[in-house]
Each structure stands twice: as structure tokens, then as C-alpha cells.
């Protein structure tokens, strides 16, 4: 069966400028002082950074604030932070972490064992044979699984083609295993194109933390608890734990109402026709963003896009399905995910990020015709300051708590206070954030 690709995912767009040597990048990303830019303050000692996580309260107030302000760029326990923010580890109860990690790893191990279907040597060769079409047939399931894995592999081998880390056969096998296990554990979701793009940063972050552990172990002894939590043997299982929690939060971008995949894992051939007649949750979400957030806050930009007949669905579906994975360089994307995870478990901030991204390039959009507008939206400028995008999204969501970054303040309809005061408050907050690093 042919696998039709969604053109809107735009796999041929320019890739991030990501260093090829991922191992070295992991050390720099996770705070290796030898790779730190000149002038940057030395990172916390490894054990001290770990202890700061242990001291976090049940509400993770300090950690959330740090994540929202972009303070996790040099974190050497980012995957652990994500587990705390996503509920895979219980905040304020570090004594339970080892058992929770073990439970999640056992869950994945059990799931993989259950999914291993080997029809060879079947006890009933007469009734269960390779030609059987019975859905209860072991052979039938075997061929269905093989087809689904081949489908997944077609996407996985194309993940970040410019990054050597994702060219490794071991990494690709890990990703295929995770996506296949997820598809079988959550049959209503199954596998949809784009899920591999969500998984890739997760595997990268878990790998980076494990590399930081190995690097630290070369220099000094590390607490057994850290070694257990970041054991490199469990790259696949730990990535699966994070991936399924992220997918749980964004399942509305993938789930097709009143539609279930076939036993092979494919959705019916008439899926596109059905989709035209049934409003997908992601379309409803984008309509809400357009009507509730964009139209009243920036009517000029809203009207311009309407006049050009550029609906948010044209580019927004990809933005939401991939959690903006194709719009920003990888390191900026991780900072953006830090903020999304820290804001709320339901990822409410993504709605405001969509509007923030539009407002950030509004001057260009307002001057552009249909073709130029669409180019900007489908190939979002990678040079945008991710902290500005995040800060403006936070302001849109909670204007009483956050001030807008002055660089992208649009028409006065969005600003309720004096612009000069906004600038003073914004720079003061940035200075306070830098002083805490």
C-alpha cells in the first residue's frame, strides 16, 4: 500500500544549522565549560545541579520560572526536568524517582515483548498459515506489523537529514521501535506522519543528558541515583516515556474523530474524504486561535491574511502537529519546548505561540502578496529570537503577569500600558534572569 506524504510538512525546506558532531554538541549543550562561549559563567557543578532538582517543591515554581525564561539552555538534566514537568516523575518526592523510572522501563520492556510476533513454528500450521486472512492469525499480524514498521521507517530515515546523529542505524532503529510500540499501544492514534519529528528532539535530549553523565564520570564519581536515572542502556525506554506523554498532550492534532485504523495500522483509503466532512480537532483549535486570539488582538493582520485567502490551517496544522519542530533551529526548539512544558501540562501556550510567531513577522506579512506571505509562513525565518517569541506568547496569555518584549509590539490594541514602562520592565526582568544564571 502506498504511503502518501502530506506536502504541507515540507521536508525539502532548509535544515537547522546543527553541529554534525552530536557527541561534542551534547557536552557543550549540557554545560561543558571547555565548550562554553567566552564570558559565560561556569555552570553549576554536576552534583549540585542534580541536588537543585531534588529540592524543587511539588509546584516546581522555581523550575517553571527558569524554563520560561530560557534558563535551561545549559542544563545537564533537561530530560529529567521534562519528566518532572510532564508528570513522569513526582515533583517534591525524589525518593520515588528510582521506582518510577524502573516502572516506566519495565512497562516499555513488557510492551516490546508482547509485540514480538513470531509465526514460525506455529502450533496450528493448518489453520494458521502465511496465506491466512483471518485477523486472529499470527501470520496476518506478523505481516501487518512488518508493513507498519516499513511505513514508519520511510519517515524515520528522512529525519533531520543534515544531522549525522539521526543517520546512525542504532538511532533509527530506536526511533522505529518507539513509534511502532506507540502505534500498537495506542491503536486509535496508531502512527501518523509527523510523529517521528516529535520524537527526534526527545531522543536527542535524552542522549545529550546521557553523554553529559558519561563525560562527568570520566572526571569524577557520580551518585548512584543519577547513574540509574540516566543509564545509557535505557535510551529507548526513557525516550518512549517522554514521547508518549508529549503525544498525550497533542493528540488532538493527530486524532481523527470517528475513525480507527485498519488492522494493518493504516487508516482507510477514504480518510481524506471523511476528513473533509468531519472537523478535525486541530482545525477547531486553529479556528479558535484565529477568532479568539488573532482577530481581536491584531485585526489588521487578521484581515490581511483573510483577504489573501491564507487560512491558518494552511501552515498552522504543521506548526501544531510538529510542535514547531520545522520552524526553528534545534537548540531554539528545545528552549521553546522548555517553556511549553513548563507553562501547563495541557500545552496551552502553543495557541499563543502561533499568534506570537505571526506578530513577530507582521510587518513583512503586511507588505507581502500571497506568494511572499506563504513563503514566510511555510519557511519561517530561522533568525527570529526565540526568547522574544516566548515572551510575547506569555504576555498574550497572561498580560497581568508578563510584559511584552518591545521588539514586536504591534498596534496599540495589544498594549494596555505605557510602552516605555514595558521596555523598562522587560529589560529589568531579563537582567534579573541573567544574574541568576
Image (cartoon, helix red, strand yellow):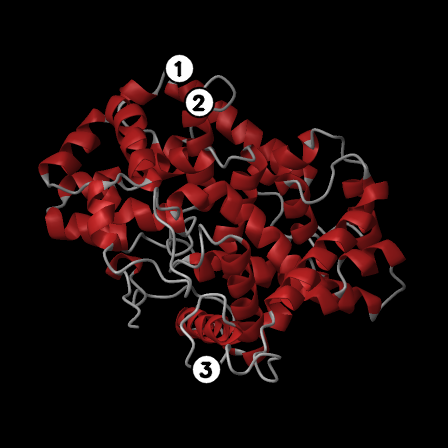
Residue that appears at 27% across and 38% down: 279
Q: Is there any visible trace of residue 208 in the rendered image?
A: no
Q: Quadrant of the C terminus?
A: top right
How far apart in space, not on screen, are marks 3 and 1 (Cα)?
A: 71 Å
How far apart in space, not on screen, are marks 2 and 1 (Cα)?
A: 7 Å
For residue 114, above or below residue 308:
below
Residue that appears at 35% across and 42% down: 257
- Label 3–label 2 contact, CB within 8 A: no
Mark 2 lies on residue: 422
110 lies left or right of 99? left
How far apart in space, not on screen, are marks 3 and 2 (Cα)?
A: 70 Å
- Label 2–label 1 contact, CB within 8 A: yes
How many numbered circles are shown? 3
Mark 1 lies on residue: 417
N-term mark: 3 or 1: 3
Mark 3 lies on residue: 130
Q: What secondary structure is marked by label 2?
A: helix
Residue 331 position, x and y percent, is 52, 56
Q: Residue furthest front?
A: 126
Judge the density around disc 1: few (<14), some (14-19), many (≥20) Cα neighbours within 10 Å: few
Q: What secondary structure is marked by label 3?
A: loop
Dividing the picture into quadrants, the one containing residue 428 is: top right
Residue 281 position, x and y percent, is 34, 38
N-term mark: 2 or 1: 1
* Disc 3 versus disc 1: nearer the observer: 3
Q: Nearer the viewer, residue 340 or 197?
A: 197
For residue 264, above or below residue 346:
below
Amino acid at each position: 500500500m502506498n504511503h502518501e506524504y502530506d506536502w504541507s510538512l515540507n521536508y525539502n525546506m532548509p535544515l537547522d544549522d546543527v553541529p554534525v558532531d552530536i557527541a561534542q554538541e551534547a557536552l557543550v549543550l549540557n554545560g561543558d565549560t571547555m565548550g562554553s562561549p567566552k564570558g559565560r559563567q561556569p555552570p553549576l557543578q554536576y552534583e549540585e545541579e542534580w541536588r537543585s532538582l531534588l529540592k524543587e517543591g511539588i509546584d516546581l515554581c522555581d523550575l517553571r520560572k527558569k524554563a520560561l525564561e530560557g534558563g535551561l539552555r545549559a542544563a545537564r538534566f533537561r530530560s529529567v526536568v521534562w519528566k518532572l514537568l510532564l508528570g513522569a516523575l513526582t515533583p517534591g518526592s525524589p525518593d520515588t524517582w528510582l521506582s518510577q523510572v524502573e516502572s516506566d522501563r519495565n512497562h516499555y520492556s513488557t510492551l516490546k515483548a508482547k509485540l514480538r510476533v513470531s509465526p514460525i513454528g506455529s502450533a496450528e500450521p493448518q489453520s494458521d498459515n502465511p496465506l491466512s486472512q483471518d485477523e486472529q492469525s499470527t501470520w496476518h499480524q506478523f505481516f501487518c506489523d512488518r508493513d507498519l514498521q516499513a511505513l514508519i521507517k520511510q519517515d524515520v530515515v528522512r529525519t533531520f537529514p543534515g544531522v549525522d546523529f539521526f543517520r546512525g542505524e542504532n538511532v533509527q532503529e530506536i526511533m522505529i521501535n518507539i513509534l511502532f510500540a506507540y502505534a500498537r499501544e495506542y491503536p486509535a492514534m496508531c502512527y501518523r506522519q509527523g510523529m517521528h519529528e516529535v520524537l527526534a528532539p526527545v531522543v536527542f535530549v535524552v542522549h545529550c543528558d546521557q553523554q553529559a553523565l558519561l563525560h562527568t564520570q570520566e572526571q569524577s564519581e557520580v551518585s548512584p541515583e543519577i547513574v540509574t536515572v540516566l543509564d545509557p542502556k535505557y535510551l529507548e525506554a526513557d525516550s518512549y516515556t517522554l514521547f508518549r506523554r508529549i503525544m498525550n498532550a497533542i493528540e488532538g492534532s493527530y486524532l481523527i474523530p470517528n475513525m480507527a485504523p485498519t488492522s494493518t495500522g493504516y487508516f482507510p483509503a477514504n480518510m481524506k474524504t471523511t476528513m473533509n466532512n468531519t472537523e478535525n480537532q486541530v482545525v477547531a483549535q486553529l479556528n479558535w486561535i484565529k477568532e479568539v486570539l488573532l482577530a481581536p488582538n491584531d485585526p489588521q493582520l487578521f484581515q490581511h491574511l483573510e483577504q489573501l485567502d491564507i487560512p491558518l490551517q494552511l501552515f498552522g496544522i504543521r506548526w501544531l502537529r510538529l510542535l514547531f519542530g520545522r520552524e526553528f533551529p534545534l537548540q531554539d526548539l528545545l528552549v521553546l519546548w522548555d517553556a511549553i512544558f513548563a507553562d501547563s501540562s495541557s500545552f496551552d501556550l502553543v495557541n499563543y505561540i502561533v499568534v506570537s510567531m505571526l506578530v513577530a513577522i507582521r510587518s513583512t506579512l503586511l507588505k507581502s502578496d500571497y506568494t511572499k506571505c506563504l513563503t514566510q509562513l511555510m519557511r519561517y525565518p530561522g533568525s527570529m529570537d526565540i526568547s522574544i517569541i516566548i515572551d510575547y506568547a506569555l504576555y498574550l496569555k497572561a498580560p497581568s503577569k508578563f510584559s511584552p518584549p518591545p521588539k514586536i509590539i504591534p498596534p496599540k490594541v495589544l498594549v494596555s500600558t505605557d510602552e516605555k514602562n514595558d521596555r523598562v520592565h522587560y529589560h529589568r526582568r531579563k537582567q534579573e534572569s541573567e544574574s541568576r544564571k
